[in-house]
Image: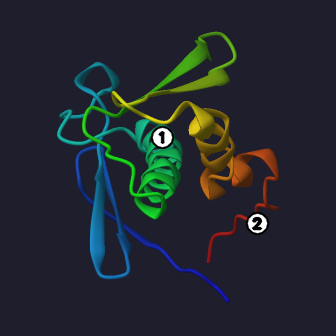
Amino acid sequence: MKMATEVFFPGGKRVYAQIGGMIVATDQSKENGGEGTAPEPFQLFLASIATCAGIYALEFCKLREIEMSGMLLTMTCDFDQKKHVCERVSIDLKLPTGFPEKYKKAIVRSMDLCSVKNQVVHPPEFVITAS
């Protein structure tokens, strides 16, 4: 199975991706010459890791009928300015009041199954061409 994404350039430093009939907008910050109208591509990449871990946490709770009110996931990236790379990603899930202690390690293991994170851990081969 192949998954396709079409990217187009609406002007300025905006770059949009069309995926399954939906548009994902990116822009550069004003500091980087853009208008700051949307997340930068790297921010979107980081958000995809966080939201993927979040969906695994959500499904974990839904399957066990655990109340999620007050649950909050926070992700931080330790960024090396010289190398321009994120060297460490930390994900913390604030559990809701009354979350069963017996499930604490299990929900962390569940979030660790995130397919976006696993794609980073096991990177694909990149083939870049121009036609």
Residue located at (17% from left, 40% from top):
37
Position of 75 with respect to 117 (left or right) is left
Secondary structure state at the residue bearing disc 2: loop
Relative vertical location of residue 6 with respect to residue 71 in this rendering, above or below: below
Residue located at (34% from left, 34% from top):
71
* Type of amino acid at the residue the image marks with label 2: Val
* Type of amino acid at the residue the image marks with label 1: Ala
Q: On the image, which quarter does residue 25 sit in?
A: bottom left
- Measured from the top left, where is residue 83 in percent x and y? 69, 17
Foreground pick, 25 / 53:
53
- Measured from the top left, where is residue 59 in percent x and y? 47, 59
Residue identified by numbered label 1: 50
Label 1 vs label 2: CA separation? 26 Å
* Circle 1 or circle 2, nearest the eye: 1
| Label at residue 13 | none
| Label at residue 127 | 2
